[in-house]
Amino acid sequence: MPAQILNGKRIAEQIQQHIRARIDAHVANGHRPPGLAVIMVGNDPASEIYVRNKHLACEKVGIFSQLYQLSPLIPEASLIALIDELNAAPNIDGILVQLPLPAHIDRQNIIESIRPEKDVDGFHPYNLGRLAQQSPLLRPCTPFGIMELLKTTEIDLKGLTATVVGTSNIVGLPMLLELLIAGCTVTACHRLTTNLPLAVQNADLLIVAAGSPELIKGEWVKPGAIIIDVGMNRMDNGQLVGDVEFEQAKSRAAYITPVPGGVGPMTVTALLTNTLYAYKTLHLKTSPIVKMENQ
């Protein structure tokens, strides 16, 4: 039978309704809404789309969002000065710097200038370190969203053989940590991996974030596997494809994410969840310290 489609858009909608209800309850009790500052340097068209989608999602759930659109020529020191102001702002719970940044700005310096408790992207070394120690605080959004997506399959991940293709600090590396915490036996694949087909064939759970269109051939997929395709590649004809051969893989897998409409909406929803968590648990001193259900 063909794979069941993991509809990230539908699942994200359900989680966002829950987030909205929680925020409405806080505001009804006299608290301010959560606040998110989004910084975009330059006018990269893809970044503009991502930022717009995040703003609309914030608006939908009741999070105040403020966009700072800056010149691509802004000095690094000026960008850090703005982040310092937002670190101190009492109405801002999360700070997101949209990537990529211009070449003259050191991305790591910018990430580390954000206070860890406002790092709702989950990229700060402190937050990655917490994840590595199996005590996550603010979790990297794409892996966090994927874990929420996997919950909907109701499959126990403990003991599964998982393969992650791609080891970036944004997706692949924290994804490995999330899966280890979940009890999977994990294989990491990257550009130096010598037998990628074998690693894919062994995977009960396959997560691909390589940024290479249809890198993973459908014939490699283990029958009954769960496939999470993080890739988003625009072809010359305008078509969006993932890192996995979708139609061929769908005939072998048990579950598979579509591109688009799979991982993307869950990443945005994880950002909203992190912002609410930072607001309620880390910043809203008049509220009790209660760990969120999704954290």
Image (tube, rainbow, N blue to C red):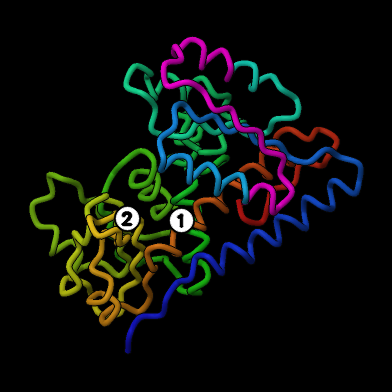
The local crowd at label 2, few if under 14, some if 14 to 19, many if 20 or more residues have their Cα within 10 Å, is: many
What residue would you read off at disc 2? 231
Compared to 222, does 283 lie above or below? Answer: above
What residue would you read off at disc 1? 264
Q: Nearer the viewer, residue 84 or 236?
A: 236
- Range of the magenta residues? 57-83
Residue type, label 2:
Gly
Please name the residue shown 78% across and 58% down the image.
21
User: Which residue of the protein is positioned furthest toward the left in this rendering?
Assistant: 194
Compared to 211, does 15 lie above or below? Answer: below
Label 2 sits on a secondary structure element that is loop
Q: Is residue 60 left or right of residue 70?
A: right
Instruction: Tell me the CA gap for discs 2 and 1.
Output: 9 Å
Q: Are marks 2 and 1 in contact (CB under 8 Å)?
A: no
- Residue 215 in percent (x, y) is at 18, 59
User: Which residue of the protein is positioned furthest toward the bottom in this rendering?
Assistant: 1
Does the segment drawn in magenta span residue 82?
yes
Q: Is residue 104 left or right of residue 67?
A: left
Does the segment drawn in magenta span residue 5?
no
Q: Is residue 206 visible?
A: yes
- Residue 140 in percent (x, y) is at 48, 43
- Residue 262 in percent (x, y) is at 44, 64
Q: Is residue 135 visible?
A: no
Please name the residue shown 48% across and 59% down the image.
147
Q: Nearer the viewer, residue 259 or 202?
A: 259
User: Which residue of the protein is positioned furthest toward the front in this rendering?
Assistant: 237
Q: Is residue 188 left or right of residue 93?
A: left
Q: Is residue 6 left or right of residue 12?
A: left
- Residue 96 in percent (x, y) is at 54, 33
Using the rendered view, name the quadrant where residue 32 is placed.
top right
Tell me the number on the disc at residue 98: none
The local crowd at label 1, few if under 14, some if 14 to 19, many if 20 or more residues have their Cα within 10 Å, is: many
